[in-house]
Image (cartoon, coloured by chain):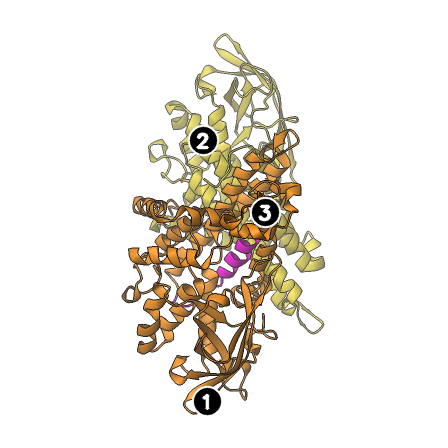
Amino acid sequence: MDLRFTDDELAFREQVRGFVKANLPASIRQRILEGRHPRKDDIVTWTRILSKQGWSVPHWPKEWGGTGWSAVQLLIFNDELQQAGAPEPLAFGTSMVGPVIYTFGSDAQKRRFLPRIANIDDWWCQGFSEPGAGSDLAGLKTTARREGGEWVINGQKTWTTLAQYADWIFVLARTDASVKKQEGISFILVDMKSPGVTVRPIQTLDGGHEINEVFFDDVRVPLENLVGEENKGWNYAKFLLGNERNGIARVGASKARIKRIRELASLQVYGEKPKIEDPLFRMKLAAVEVELKALEMTQLRVIAGERKREKGKPDPTSSVLKIKGSEIQQATSELLMDVVGPYALPYQPEREDGDRWNEPPVGPDWASTIAPTYFNLRKVSIYGGSNEIQRGIIAKAILGL
Amino acid sequence: MNFDLTEEQQLLKDSVTRLLADRYGFEARKGFQATPEGWSRDLWRQYGEIGLLGVAFAEADGGFGGGPVETMLIMEAFGRALTLEPYLATVVLAGGLIRRAGNAEQRAALIPAIASGELLLAFAHAERQSGHDLFDVGASAREDGGSFVLNGEKGLVLHGDCADKLIVSARRAGARRDRSGIGLFLVDAKADGVARRGYRTQDGQRAAEVTLTNVRVAAKDVLAGDEDPFPLIERVVDEAIAATSAEAVGAMSEALDMTVDYLKTRKQFGVPIGSFQALQHRASDMVVAMEQARSMMMLATMMAGEENAAERRKAISAAKVQIGRSIRFIGQQAIQLHGGIGMTMEYKLGHVFKRLTMIDILFGDADYHLERLSRGDGLIG
């Protein structure tokens, strides 16, 4: 047992760190570390920088642009990028539909879509949740019927993140209503420019526009856009969700937020002393750091265990990572609320467009994102399978209850 | 980075697990506890035979050259079985002090006897007023013609009642709460002026209050020579925290397994109670607390041997916080999910709960270590 990184792994970390430092544009880095949403261009710019280096889809098979890195290297890579304030890759492409396509898709689909995902030539979004199908995802009602050599899709998807920019959406649709609900679902790729697709924005608590409703009204899709076999879509969805949970601990992002908390708490003075000198605040901060350190170790253990597992089967322990990772992200956002204090109050959504905004901010210039971040991060214990769903998975898959 | 055990470590783990499975059932444990000493000399001898008592010492000193990983494996197995023998007192605490602060002669005289199981030791350090502060030592050591004369009172000396020798901390210089000026002395438990009052602790283990009245100690029985032994005391206590973290992980695993079995077999309203979602989710939260604790046990084990004292203490404190929090949650929920049977002396779970509760208190509870950690510059570098 040796839990230290090897010299090679440490050298790899330095290499990644050096690359990010040299190549991540300062304006993007600043926006992310200040807790603002990345713009579409930020994500595209950064993904193309990574793509040029051969690093945009490191976890993929080598023939489709992967790097062949070990699980530990992948972890170090993600951790470094998150800590450095790099925008997250567009997970809907790189971590969701990409792996589904290279695992279950046709050769034509692989050749057509995978290179464009790796270079973010296509922007993907996820057509899973529906108004009546949240945690009970298999209860979805959107239908796809065969008609004249095409699929005809009708229904509604919701909580569709960044659909406003999307070129493509992967849709779970019911293709057989006569069987058990999990056995009549198919996984279909839909061009967002197809007639009959409508996107309507949903504003979230923080005032931002991240999510949308997507309506399908007799949308016609070529039959070849079916991934894998008809009515096997639920299996592909479970595969996708298992992959999603592995990246969901977000240890690096929480580390970055803790560094920011320390930084801001040293600046912020109410009364006589900076917040960082408040013993109660320091105890709360230390408690979150302990949990994060433990989570980082747990994540390493899960990764080490993966070597011994059957390929493609997600470890149910990843549900532990989802629960703890989301709780810690939320806890760090609460600590930021402690730091900012009363100047959390002013609502300044126009500050999102910082460099186009000429008025001085109300309050400290870093304060305007704090409350919105706290509001926004309530989502992390809801998405990706709510934490209650994760507890159900642990009870069944780990404890056998 | 790897989490794998070496072949030797796996063998050690298997042999201690097998021995305890054969000999340390809950009924057997009750028998050991009911003896006057409150633990089993026979098992102690067998620990010696399979190498548990010597594994942590250097081969040159008569040990087997193991380290914190070996101690972790042994302590985790002890935690599951809820063993009562003076392993922490003799091998981890006092043995650790001899290993780190003993000179060649002292090591040669004591370590083979510890490894063979002939010699029992205890660390007489805490005092009534000291709380969790290791530097708070009021007992005095007055130099007198080449030897020392000790006076003072030591409390909560783990397994101090059965020990053949005590390692006593006493002040050679300075005021009660100074970090420097503390000395370490090897004292025969039957020496003139040593009075011991042994008692049972809440978790079924043994401890003693020790009074020292003009106890004379020869110069050859001073540990660490003229070096300040306090950093070594801190270091050994950090090793003991790593060790008890492993014991706690073993005991928590036992509590969780018992609870899950109970949820599967206990029927109410015509169904196993584990079919109820409220209870499933509680058990799942216990799994989360368990995994976090196990991770920090490993961190503590890895960092117990760290030479940089500040880094080591940070990691050890972080582990103690997480282990303490997991102890409270898993211990309390295990009792709650068992209902009435968890409240009884006749059932193992309550004893696991009590041992866990006491491990949190030993060497500084979660809040003490959280406060210590909070004064530093943080864990996230």
Display colour for chain B: yellow
N-terminal label among 1 and 3: 1
Q: Mark 3 — on which chain does it sit?
A: A
- Figure label count: 3
Q: Which residues are magenta?
A: A310-327
Q: Is residue A204 magenta?
A: no
Mark 3 is on which residue type?
Ser
In the image shown, does A174 or A242 lie closer to the viewer?
A174
Left or right: B334 as drawn, with respect to A232: right
Which of discs 1 and 3 lies nearer the camera? The answer is: 3
Display colour for chain A: orange
The quadrant the C terminus of chain A occupies is bottom right
In the image shown, does A91 or A100 lie closer to the viewer?
A91
Residue B309 is marked as: 2
Determine crowd level at label 2: few under 14, some 14-19, many 20+ residues with C-alpha closer than 10 A.
Answer: some
Q: Which residue is mark 3?
A: A368
In the image shown, does A83 or B348 lie closer to the viewer?
A83
Left or right: B187 as drawn, with respect to B56: right
Q: Secondary structure at mark 3?
A: helix
**Mark pair 3, 2: CA separation:** 41 Å
Mark 1 is on which residue type?
Arg
Tags 3 and 2 both on a single chain: no
Horizontal and vertical percent position of residue A386? 57, 64
Residue ID at (46%, 27%):
B232
Q: Mark 2 — on which chain does it sit?
A: B
In the image shown, does A102 or A309 lie closer to the viewer?
A102
Horizontal and vertical percent position of residue A35? 52, 49
- Residue extending furthest bottom? A148
Which of discs 2 and 1 lies nearer the camera? The answer is: 1
Q: Which residue is mark 1?
A: A146
**Mark pair 1, 3: CA separation:** 51 Å
